[in-house]
Amino acid sequence: MAANVNPVDIKPDLKKAVNGFGSFKVALATVLTVKIVLDLATFFEYPPVVIEELSNAAASSGLLMIRYMEERGQIEPTSIMTLLCALKKICLSGIEMRVRKLYEEHTGRLCSSDDHSKAQLEGKKNDLIKYAKTAYRKHYETAKPFPSMNKCKVNSIFVQGGIYCSVQEGDFMQKPDVLESLDSYNDILSSPKTKSNRKIIEADPGFGNQHLHHSLSMTGVLTTLNLL
């Protein structure tokens, strides 16, 4: 199956790769014997019905395998690293080098080495961790101290975001809960929005729900409050 790419719509440096990818696939089909095809299909964990189809394809098994690999993104006009890594892992380094050379000759693109690919992945992982840490610090530095509840002091509590009241309207089986923002933490007890006799405090670990529960127990509402 030919790649659904219009060379007019892509960057000039990729046109040769796209235009030469078809001839590369034709050359690749001559390299992929039935045994290599079945080894690759097993490595890629293709369904048994597909493996059987490849086995029965005989002389056309290479072209059929190329079609399946292209459909699954295992070979693309701009990269065949998945195929090269698979050939190397199933101890077909000679075939891997031959396929690499064919791709470079037909498309004009150099294949990255395994070490280079690993370095790229490691760099992307480090960038992700860096950005995640930055976002985490930015998010949690906005936390504010937990205020006292009904003059009962709660020490060293920090919360994130805000407090929302889940209000049930009518039949809860037919209407979903509605989240309404509370103006302050005291609204948990005093707001008309929380007039229910049964209050459920739900929060992620570390956001002060245990301390809030202990503080509220001093107000005499422990019997009407459940902590999740």
Image (spheres, rainbow, N blue to C red):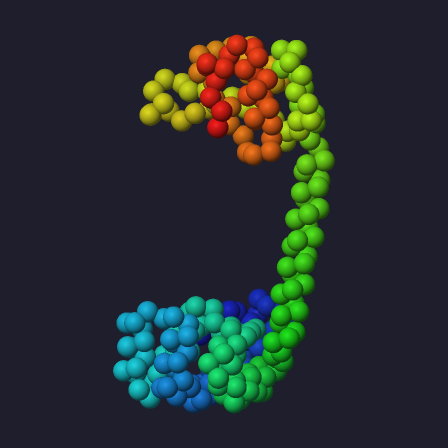
The residue at the point 38 percent across, 75 percent down is: 42
Left or right: 224, with 59 as reference point? right
The residue at the point 64 percent across, 13 percent down is: 152
Left or right: 180, with 52 as reference point? right
Q: Residue 220 appears at what percent x and percent y?
A: 52, 10
Please tell me whether residue 127 is drawn above or below residue 207 in the rendered image. Answer: below
Please tell me whether residue 28 is drawn above or below residue 118 in the rendered image. Answer: below
Residue 153 visible to an observer of this rendering: yes
Number of marks drawn:
0
Q: Residue 94 appears at what percent x and percent y?
A: 52, 89
Residue 30 appears in which quarter of the rendering? bottom left
The residue at the point 51 percent across, 81 percent down is: 88
Residue 102 visible to an observer of this rendering: no
Q: Residue 79 appears at what percent x and percent y?
A: 55, 74
The residue at the point 44 percent across, 72 percent down is: 70
Q: Residue 128 appears at what percent x and percent y?
A: 65, 54
Can you say which quadrant of the picture contains the N terminus?
Answer: bottom left
Nearer to the camera, 43 or 110: 43
Nearer to the camera, 137 or 76: 137
Residue 187 appears in which quarter of the rendering? top right
Nearer to the camera, 96 or 106: 96
